[in-house]
Image (spheres, coloured by chain):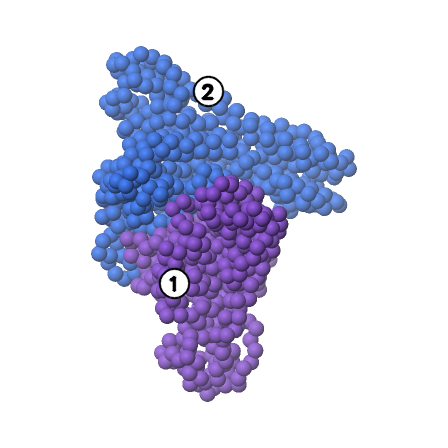
Chain colours: A purple, B blue
Amino acid sequence: MEKEVVKDIARMDEDFSKWYTDIVTKAGLVDYSPVKGFMVIKPYGYEIWENIQKELDKKFKETGHKNAYFPLLIPESMLNIEKEHVEGFAPEVAWVTHGGEEKLEERLCIRPTSETIIATMYAKWVKSYRDLPVLINQWANVVRWEKTTRPFLRTTEFLWQEGHTLHETSEEAMDETIKMLNIYAELFEEFLAIPVIKGEKSNKEKFAGAENTFTIEALMHDGKALQSATSHYFGDRFAKAYNIKYQGRDSKEATPFQTSWGMSTRSIGGIIMTHGDERGLKLPPKVAPIQVIIVPFAQHKEGVLEEVDKLRITLKNKFRIEADIRDSYTPGYKCNDSELKGIPVRIEIGPKDIEKGECILFRRDTYEKKSVSLDNLENEIERLLEDIQKNMFEMAKENRTNKTHVAKSLDEIKEILSKEQSLIKTAWCGDRECEDRLKEETSATIRCIPFDEEKIADTCGLCSKTANNTVYLAKQY
Amino acid sequence: MEKEVVKDIARMDEDFSKWYTDIVTKAGLVDYSPVKGFMVIKPYGYEIWENIQKELDKKFKETGHKNAYFPLLIPESMLNIEKEHVEGFAPEVAWVTHGGEEKLEERLCIRPTSETIIATMYAKWVKSYRDLPVLINQWANVVRWEKTTRPFLRTTEFLWQEGHTLHETSEEAMDETIKMLNIYAELFEEFLAIPVIKGEKSNKEKFAGAENTFTIEALMHDGKALQSATSHYFGDRFAKAYNIKYQGRDSKEATPFQTSWGMSTRSIGGIIMTHGDERGLKLPPKVAPIQVIIVPFAQHKEGVLEEVDKLRITLKNKFRIEADIRDSYTPGYKCNDSELKGIPVRIEIGPKDIEKGECILFRRDTYEKKSVSLDNLENEIERLLEDIQKNMFEMAKENRTNKTHVAKSLDEIKEILSKEQSLIKTAWCGDRECEDRLKEETSATIRCIPFDEEKIADTCGLCSKTANNTVYLAKQY
């Protein structure tokens, strides 16, 4: 019985994809829905999202942004205004054609993203330079009709936030674009313990309709990259297409500059694939719905459950804590279950421990156990959680370092990828043909041109022309 | 210029409907969208919703509920399972027929409410009595294809929460139904300062598919009632229809009992129409996005803006406070603007006040002003906000009392309604015919059978039969 939980999970080195599916379902994060491509986010998964929301929303508000809410449905004609944008999104939207019993005069799409409706409203709202900047974010659901879906990583409907801002100058808009990228990077590194690479997307990979797309890319356990959040600079393209104009400081009519930036429930997939291990999910303390779980041993013995409850009540003002006092499971089963669920710290306590005024603290990241005095428990746990948060980031970084290689030719790239999925740094001439060829021959893509670009070669790793950039390549989710 | 803001608002006693529309748009709560029937919730309106969410979510969690997220789209066949439910909702759903370029095999509706998809998932999740109770809530958007829409009150898309629970016994489910109704009543009375009547809906007015629907009804300034939140008891109907079964304590197969309960952005319409006045919106301090606004006088004079900023910084840890230091508006305009926006407390401060170490405190509910020492400002404001919250509830209650009448015959009902829209208490035999006749002849409806039923007559106020209940009647939003 004790091994029951663990046995059910595929080995990550044997079948990473099945391991992932096992974790998301068995740890109780999501369930498949009868509606193809749609997932149900179960309470334990949704609590992770709530913690991310709370943290990110705080950062947005601290930087002067406000939330608002725009319509779910967008008329076809409104989607069609910006050419590149519609080409990118029209093939993957869901269309509403009937309202009640009646056929609609114009069909409406469920928002795949909200640039079009938001730009339409901004055109009504912005009249003068005094109305700028506009700094608005929306927490919402969006729908993109995907052919192949996986929980969190790619689902037909997902939850996200999308920020949409307007500025007087292009410099200010570009500053905002980078500022928001940095906020995402901070969230990922400091809150989710996921190291990311900040960089710019190639023309091929940028958002439909954007001038520049910036990204944070994270490397998963299996050596594939996950685009984790993006921030787009639009210049004045959307503003011109949607006729947003204002009277400038010089009383002349001007067009504002625009940005948008987003992050989604996909990030939960990133947490799983960065930190998870053979025993299951492993959650960084800051985002964990349950930071500490108490597992009683011999809970039928006198005084055990009382002590457990006393501990829980003492500690609950400080930590997100629960006690697993189910009487239909053994302590061993509960321990495995808490590891499957990725709970950072476990308190094990039985009659002998209570006698000695002690308990066992187990840390999920390293599997280490130690005895601690009940008198000093709060401080010990506080320090432990901090240490786990830090250590998980370091472990993830080490894993990324081990899986990062430099290649100077397509042959080298192929050789590296034939051994294991990796993040590969190479030089690039900047041409689309090289990018297409890379994908065709290796199925890897250029993930980004990193901000901290160090020159690694004079010639493109994909052709023989002069290199203009250093880039990161990888297969992607 | 000073009267500019106020002049634009229709008088509430002359055209309540236009007054309402003026308030919601001019106070910056919403805007109309180019998509018919859909509203855009602007930042100031959305902040009210965020405050409501935070308070209600806390209450849900304190009572053991967890949040989750279920799919936006529901297959037609799934909607069709429970007969009464589909009859109630099918005429008003939006239908998705195409995903990308392809026609769907089965059309999907955008959720008008989620009983069907949630019951389908619960059938998968619940196996044993140990899995009960299931206490789940969802914050989501829903769509109902409405013919006539008004911001907040009735919109094609709205934001809400919907709780869906399962229980072992019918008593436990009924307890939950009433518990959640009480939580709504508490939210409305203590947080939104809106007095409500708790009661049960008649068979005609109950939720499609429910056994019993309970409601809280509030009376608006114009004498019409607003159904403000509802809580439904389903018995085992949905569970049977959707095949939710579990193994009971006696090892026999059993069917659980179910509830659902919801509250929406409609509540913001209730705040406006309960508290608003000739000067605009009037927000209860607990829900107000800005609780205190500082309006400087002669802000160009030395030291004024410095003092304003000092005050703002000192007070901002305690209150939601802003300073209106725009240099393109007069103090008079700013005062009117703060009243239009319903900000509970205004601090007016100019060079002479600063010299005396004083400022003026203005309260939005009674228009009273008083001088207070800057040394004691924090305490004064704290007391003032508490007093405003309490007083707004009392004012609303008094208004309701003034507009509540007892009638013992249809003629009396008609006479009262011919004078002014009112809440009318009468006796009712319980027959649907009387209910239909009431609506036909007066356009009022039975709002609820109140919990604190006091007998007011032996015979039905609509026919001559024996009365079985006391009911409240009103025209409704």
Distance of label 1 from label 2 (alpha carbons): 61 Å
Q: Which mark is residue A20?
A: 1
> In the rendered view of the protein, which quadrant contains the N terminus of chain B?
top right
Which callout, 1 or 2, points to the residue nearer the camera? 1
Residue at x-position 53% and y-position 61%? A368
Q: Residue furthest top?
A: B458
Identify which amino acid the numbered label 2 is placed on.
Thr
Depth check: give the residue in front, B461 or B196. B196
Residue type at numbered disc 1: Tyr
Residue at 29% over, 25% down = B439
Labels 1 & 2 near each other (Cβ < 8 A): no
Disc ID at residue B240? none
The residue at 52%/56% (across/down) is A362
Say which of A366 and A333 sits in front: A333
Q: Chain of mark 2?
A: B
Mark 2 = which residue?
Answer: B401
| Residue A33 percent coordinates (x, y) | 31, 53
| Quadrant for the C terminus of chain B in the image | top left
Which quarter of the picture shows residue A7?
bottom left
Identify the chain of the residue marked 1, using the numbered disc in the image. A
Same chain for labels 1 and 2? Say yes or no: no
Q: In front: A153, or A198?
A: A153
Residue situated in front as seen by the camera: B468 or A283: A283
Is residue A282 among what the camera can see? yes
Q: SS for tag 2?
A: helix
